[in-house]
Structure formats: structure tokens, C-alpha cells
Image (tube, helix red, strand yellow):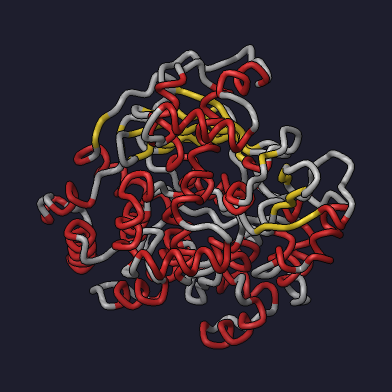
């Protein structure tokens, strides 16, 4: 799939006629006769090609006067892979919109974070997506509203507020316009769940993804590196605490063959959209595994690894600053030692919270809290202590920003300028915090061991040269190479 796929009418028609779910989220089909828009895999009989037109976003469909299909629910499609594999202005803007910035800070706040004028952002979004930031944020609010309507017993007024609408009237009008149903009709039509969550602020939902998805290294990595009190593996699910814009939350994520079951307990429901976005990002659910695996299979050494267990994702993070701190704690020590260092910080400086369903006790300490600690209390060598204190000071004062709006190349350069930050630390942060799909770790011991066993060059320079053929998916090649080892990160916990 390529950028601007909605302009390839012949390719889109083929995808719709074959009901190919791989293309869900890449483009949307609007049917001129019914004024309804669908995902490519919609189960209904495909319309005649002359009655189809194609749009790059749900927001563009809505702007053109089309309503969401009640059968295929296009608003619940996986997100476009474009936004997680690119670092240009449009991709960074879309990541920020998914993180709820427009609802919290408006379009001026969005523009300020990106360093561009609102006019420039509007122009580029319209050119590529057919909709501006307000329309894209509105489509996201409608999706959040539908989720709350169908999965919670909350009064409609509370749902309107939680979904980010400025008034009940706007909420009602938007829901009717997008779904051709009133909010109460949407609730009546929703399937009844006998096990609805009774905990205040809790809800259960399904996170879709493009198949295949191999959960072994994804959940195995998160579980094996889990920081006690902040993360845990319990009853076949990964659980962790979340620091969110309006409050905090606890998420439980369970892998299933066709979706990830997600249970969220939030102190403030206004954080729902951003919580979902961050969980999807952590699990890399918007990736296009077919495109990634097809590229890696062109290397005869990687092909057997891909064929054995296709669909590996890159385990990422819900909090970029937290991950950077943990990367420093993990320098030149074992996974167990890194967890121990992080657990001490959590106990001493994390914010306590209650978990009625498991053993989570704290939010990971904020950069501000870590910047205020006594460096002499850190049980680590003096040089790494200096690395740690410099990092948290810059994160706390805002001079280093690892957020989704950042430019990857610029952020890498800023990280490399910090004392104690070498290529491994920068690349692991780029891969798992910044989300760069082409980040590579040629100096990693696990990668060098795998390369040697597979007959690949084992020196960093030679391996990097060989890995040029894997671009732009080298972060995924790392997952396949790591998986040749018996380390716990590669296996779902028993």
C-alpha cells in the first residue's frame, strides 16, 4: 500500500470487491447511491464500481455528507499505518490529533506544538486527507462518543462531556449526522453484554488490528521488562498504570486471535480517547504486517524467521519520558537489574494509586519528581548517575521533548548530545518511544549474537550495511532477530 492509495480507483475497487480487511483504515469507500461510507472489508454486497468513490479518511467522508455504515462500522477500523511510519508534518499532526491535542488545546495549540502556522497545517491536511484538523478531531470525538454510548450506562450529558463535545446539542447533531441514529437509538441497537463493568469509570472494548499479529514478543517483552507496581502480567493479560492529561488510569490488555481485549479504568473519562490511542501505539496495532513481512522476506536469511512466526510488532510505550528513563537504567545491566532500579524509583517517587483488581500500586514517577531527587540516593555508577540527572532535568524543563509531535532526526541529535547517550540508547529510544519503524540496534548483544548464528555480518558497520535492504522496517527485523534467542522477552508468560 502506498501514500494516496484512495486515488488508485482500480486498486480500491479490487480491494472492496475482495473484501480485503488488510486495507481497512487505508481508505474508505463512499457509496453515491446510498450516501453511506464503509470500510473495504464491509460484509454487504459490494456496490457497482461506478457508484463508488474513495476518501482517505472518515472525516473526509463525513465532510462530503456520507454517513457511517451500520454493518461494518468504519469508525472502528484500525488507523492508517501511514501515521506511525512517517515523520513528516502530516504524520506528526495526525499523531497529535489522535492524542487529543485539538480537544485540549484547540488548533492553535496543535500548531504551536508543531512549530507551524494553523494555515500551513490546514493546507497540508486538506491536500492529503481531504479534511482539516477540526473535522478530523470531530470524527474522533464521534467515535469516542459511540464507544461510550454502546459500552457504558453513563447519561448522555456525561458522554458528551467525556468525548470532548462543547455542548449537548453539538453532541446530538454530530452523532445523528455521522451515524444516522440518535444517541439513544445507538444505545438501543448496541449488543447487550451480560458482563458489563460495574467499577465506576471502567469500560471494556476491542482494539482491532491488521492480521497477522504475533503476540509472543509483543506481550512477552512488556511482561519480561515490567516494573513492579507499574506493570504486571496477571491471568493472561498485561496490566499497567497510565498517566493521562486529566487524571490517571489502569489498563488491562489481553491478546485474542482477532482483537486485543482492552479494559480501562479511568479517573476521568475525558482521557478515554488518549488512553486508547496510547495503548494502540504501545502495541503497534496500526502497523501493516503484510507490507513489512513481504519486504523482510526478500532477504533469504530473514525469510524463514518471518515464515515461522509472521506479524511481529514492535513493543512500544505509553509514556515516552518514562521509557527514556528506563533505557538509561538499563544501560549495561541485565533485564532483572533494570527492573530492580526502576522499582526503587517507583516506590520512592511514584504517585500511589489503588488497584482493586491486581497488584498495581503506583504511577511511574514524572520527570519533575525525578529531577527533584537527591542524586546521591541513586544506586548506580557516577557516570550513569550524571546521564540520568541530565536526562530528567531536560525532560522536566521541556528542553527535551520526546512526544509524538517530535521530529525523529532532530530528537535523535538532541539525545546523542547528552552525556552517556551512545548509539544503542538513542536507537532503542527511537524504536520504542519515538516509534521510528526503521530504528536499528547493530551494537545490541542479542542482535550481534543472532547475526553470528544466522551467518549475517556481526560487526556493527557490516551488519548496518547488510540491513540497508530491510529499510524502512529495520525495527521489525530487530524483533525477528531477537526472537532467535530463548530470552523471556520472546515468549508469552505461562
40 lies left or right of 14: left
- At x 50%, y 64%, the residue is 125
- Residue 391 visible, this angle: yes
- At x 74%, y 38%, the residue is 72
- At x 38%, y 30%, the residue is 167
The one nearer the camera, 217 or 247, is 247
Q: As displayed, is residue 33 above or below residue 441?
A: above
In the rendered image, residue 482, in percent from the top left (x then y), is placed at 59, 62
Q: As displayed, is residue 408 above or below residue 245?
A: below
The image quadrant of residue 406 is bottom left
The C terminus sits in image quarter? top right
The one nearer the camera, 71 or 276, is 71
- Residue 285 visible, this angle: no
The image quadrant of residue 413 is bottom left
The N terminus sits in image quarter? bottom right
The one nearer the camera, 331 or 65, is 65
In the rendered image, residue 402, in percent from the top left (x then y), is placed at 34, 62
The image quadrant of residue 12 is bottom right
The one nearer the camera, 331 or 179, is 179
In the rendered image, residue 100, in percent from the top left (x then y), is placed at 40, 46
Q: How many marks?
A: 0
In the rendered image, residue 138, in percent from the top left (x then y), is placed at 48, 44
- At x 76%, y 34%, the residue is 71
Amino acid at each position: 500500500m502506498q501514500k494516496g492509495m484512495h486515488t488508485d480507483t482500480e486498486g480500491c475497487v479490487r480491494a472492496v470487491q475482495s473484501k480485503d480487511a488488510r486495507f481497512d483504515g487505508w481508505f474508505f469507500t463512499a457509496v453515491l447511491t446510498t450516501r453511506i461510507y464503509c470500510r473495504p472489508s464491509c460484509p454487504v454486497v459490494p456496490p457497482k464500481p461506478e457508484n463508488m468513490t474513495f476518501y482517505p479518511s472518515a472525516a473526509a467522508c463525513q465532510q462530503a455528507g456520507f454517513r457511517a455504515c451500520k454493518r461494518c462500522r468504519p469508525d472502528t477500523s484500525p488507523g492508517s499505518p501511514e501515521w506511525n511510519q512517517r515523520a513528516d508534518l502530516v504524520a506528526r499532526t495526525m499523531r497529535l490529533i489522535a492524542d487529543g491535542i485539538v480537544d485540549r488545546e484547540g488548533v492553535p495549540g496543535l500548531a504551536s506544538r508543531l512549530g507551524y502556522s494553523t494555515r500551513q497545517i490546514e493546507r497540508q491536511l486538506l491536500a492529503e486527507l481531504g479534511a482539516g484538523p477540526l473535522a478530523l478531531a470531530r470524527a474522533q470525538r464521534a467515535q469516542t462518543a459511540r464507544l461510550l454510548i454502546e459500552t457504558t450506562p453513563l447519561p448522555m450529558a456525561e458522554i458528551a462531556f467525556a468525548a470532548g463535545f462543547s455542548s449537548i446539542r453539538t453532541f446530538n447533531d454530530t452523532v445523528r449526522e455521522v451515524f444516522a441514529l440518535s444517541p439513544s437509538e445507538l444505545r438501543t441497537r448496541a449488543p447487550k453484554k451480560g458482563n458489563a463493568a460495574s467499577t465506576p469509570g471502567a469500560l471494556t472494548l476491542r482494539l482491532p488490528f491488521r492480521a497477522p499479529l504475533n503476540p509472543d514478543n509483543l506481550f512477552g517483552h512488556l511482561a519480561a521488562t515490567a516494573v513492579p507496581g507499574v506493570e504486571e502480567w496477571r491471568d493472561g493479560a498485561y496490566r499497567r498504570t497510565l498517566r493521562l492529561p486529566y487524571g490517571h488510569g489502569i489498563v488491562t490488555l489481553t491478546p485474542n486471535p482477532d482483537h486485543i481485549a482492552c479494559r480501562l479504568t479511568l479517573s476521568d473519562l475525558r482521557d478515554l480517547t488518549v488512553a486508547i490511542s496510547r495503548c494502540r501505539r504501545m502495541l503497534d496495532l496500526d502497523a501493516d504486517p503484510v507490507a513489512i513481512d513481504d519486504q523482510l522476506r526478500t532477504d533469504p536469511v530473514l525469510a524463514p524467521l518471518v515464515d515461522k512466526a509472521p506479524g511481529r510488532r514492535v513493543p512500544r510505550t505509553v509514556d515516552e519520558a518514562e521509557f527514556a528513563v528506563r533505557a538509561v537504567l538499563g544501560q549495561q545491566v541485565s533485564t532483572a537489574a533494570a527492573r530492580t532500579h526502576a522499582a526503587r524509583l517507583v516506590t520512592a517517587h511514584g504517585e500511589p494509586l489503588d488497584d482493586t483488581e491486581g497488584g498495581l500500586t503506583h504511577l511511574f514517577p514524572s520527570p519533575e519528581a525525578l529531577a527533584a531527587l537527591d542524586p546521591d540516593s541513586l544506586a548506580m555508577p557516577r557516570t550513569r548517575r550524571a546521564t540520568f540527572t541530565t536526562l530528567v532535568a531536560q525532560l522536566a524543563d521541556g528542553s527535551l521533548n520526546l512526544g509524538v509531535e517530535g521530529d525523529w532526526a532532530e530528537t535523535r541529535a538532541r539525545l546523542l548530545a547528552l552525556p552517556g547517550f551512545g548509539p544503542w540508547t538513542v536507537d532503542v529510544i527511537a524504536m520504542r518511544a519515538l516509534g521510528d519503524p526503521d530504528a536499528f540496534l547493530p551494537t545490541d548483544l542479542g542482535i550481534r549474537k543472532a547475526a553470528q548464528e544466522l551467518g549475517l555480518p556481526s560487526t556493527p558497520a557490516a551488519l548496518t550495511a547488510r540491513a540497508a535492504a530491510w529499510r524502512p522496517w529495520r525495527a521489525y527485523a530487530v524483533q525477528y532477530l531477537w526472537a532467535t534467542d530463548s530470552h523471556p522477552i520472546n515468549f508469552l508468560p505461562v
